[in-house]
Image (tube, helix red, strand yellow):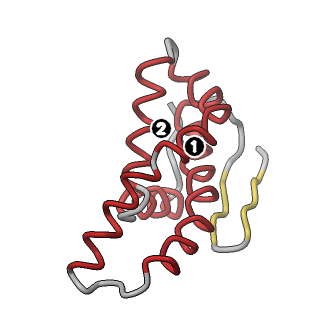
Amino acid sequence: MNELTKEERKTLEGIERAYYMQPIVRRINKWVAQYGSEPKTSWVKVLDQLHDILRNSQSDIEKLLDIRIEEGIISDKAQSRKSIAGNAFSNSLIYIFLQNKIYGDITFTSLHTKPKSLKLKNQ
């Protein structure tokens, strides 16, 4: 197993904490645990399942949005939905790439994950 840089760990933790990413991350991890006999290859194979995972997470995200409306955290569910749709895919990719780095299936020394710039730096 490989270690993440400080920036990568912070990015991974931020993705895992984002309220809308929690159902997605749960489904990604569940798929890897359930269908992957070897974590090293499972973290690559889960990329093929990402579309289905995101679609299957919609109802959970809708419930979270309903809760946030009730609590007064958001006022426009439609706008929040658009924002989530824009971020969920890229955050899911970053999450999976970082997991691949941990398990050694993708070789790069760092993954720069600042908004609007995803860069891989090869070894």
Q: Amino acid at mark 1?
A: Ile
Residue at the right extreme, as displayed: 122
The residue indicated by pointer 1 is 96
Front disc: 1 or 2:
2
Q: Are marks 1 and 2 in contact (CB under 8 Å)?
A: yes
The x, y position of residue 25, in whole percent, is 43, 46
Residue drawn at point x = 41 percent, y = 62 percent? 20
Say the numbered circle drawn on residue 28: 2
What residue is rendered at 59% in x and 36% in y? 100
Disc 2 crowd rating (10 Å Cα; few below 14, some 14-19, many 20+) is many
Height in image: 105 above or below 54?
Answer: above
Pick whichever, 73 or 37, lies toward us. Answer: 73
Q: Amino acid at mark 2?
A: Ile
Q: CA distance from mark 1 to mark 2?
A: 8 Å
SS for dot 1: helix
Front residue of 115/19: it is 19
